[in-house]
Image (cartoon, rainbow, N blue to C red):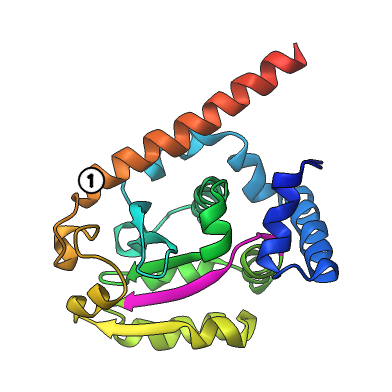
Amino acid sequence: IREDDGFILRFLRAKKFDQKKALVMLQNYHNTKKEFKEVFEKVNNPIVLKPLTEKGIMYMLQGASREGAAVMIYRPGLLDADVNIYDLMAYSVMCMEKVIEEEKYQICGVASIEDLENFNLSMMFKISPMALAKMNNIWQDAMPLRFKAVHLLNEGKVFDILMAIFKPFMKKKLLKRMHVHGSNYDELQDFIDPALLPPFLNGTGPSPKEAAEEWNKIIIVKNLNKMSTLNEEEE
């Protein structure tokens, strides 16, 4: 269990320096890592996630929102119907763990842009309510993150179904920070500089393929190096 100041500060910042709440989150973090092995064993063995990461389904933009938050692009419509949901969860945890290494994002938080075009809902019905509750617990109660906004695109009727599934597990604060844009991509430019957005979102930034490749170099290499170091220490 890490006890260095930098690590503890993540939890204090996430809870605006309320020490009791920060302690509860820290305990939840360690308990979740121990109890949710379906996810965290994969986090500790990132090579098994390579087939998923190569699809460019999820990646962080190389820049911040206008409010200073880190920005994640998520395109679930690119997922295969038979995707292992725990693989997806493990990759998202790896991404967030990397993001919050930077103090500015511990302070300014994280936002997401989620394009629901072609999203196949069938995968959602393979997840048990208990697993859903566990996954929501990771984001809302265990990870030292400050979620600033969720921007939904091409949501259509999918949004209503997803909300029916997830709303019982979501906190009111996060619900208030959800923004629905349909196919009006230009609205995103009030939130983030178009120079950072990919062309398919009417931006002038790198393509999803280029941006995802760059992000995966950071996330996969970082985790493989960490595992190599741990193995050397054990030897």
Q: Is residue 147 left or right of residue 40?
A: left
Counting every numbered tag in the picture gives 1
Question: From this viewpoint, is residue 112 visible?
Answer: yes
* Magenta stretch holds residue 151: yes
Residue 149, x across and y down, in percent: 45, 75
* Residue 139 is one of the magenta-drawn residues: no
Q: Residue at x 66, y 41 (%)?
A: 41
The magenta segment: 142-152
What amino acid is found at the position of numbered circle 1 in the picture?
A: Lys
Examine the image and state in which quarter residue 129 appears.
Answer: bottom right
Residue 192: image x %, image y %?
29, 68
Q: Which residue is mark 1?
A: 209
Q: Position of residue 184 (x, y in %)?
A: 19, 81
Q: Nearer the viewer, residue 34 or 221?
A: 221
Q: Residue at x 53, y 35 (%)?
A: 46
Image quadrant holding the N terminus, namely top right
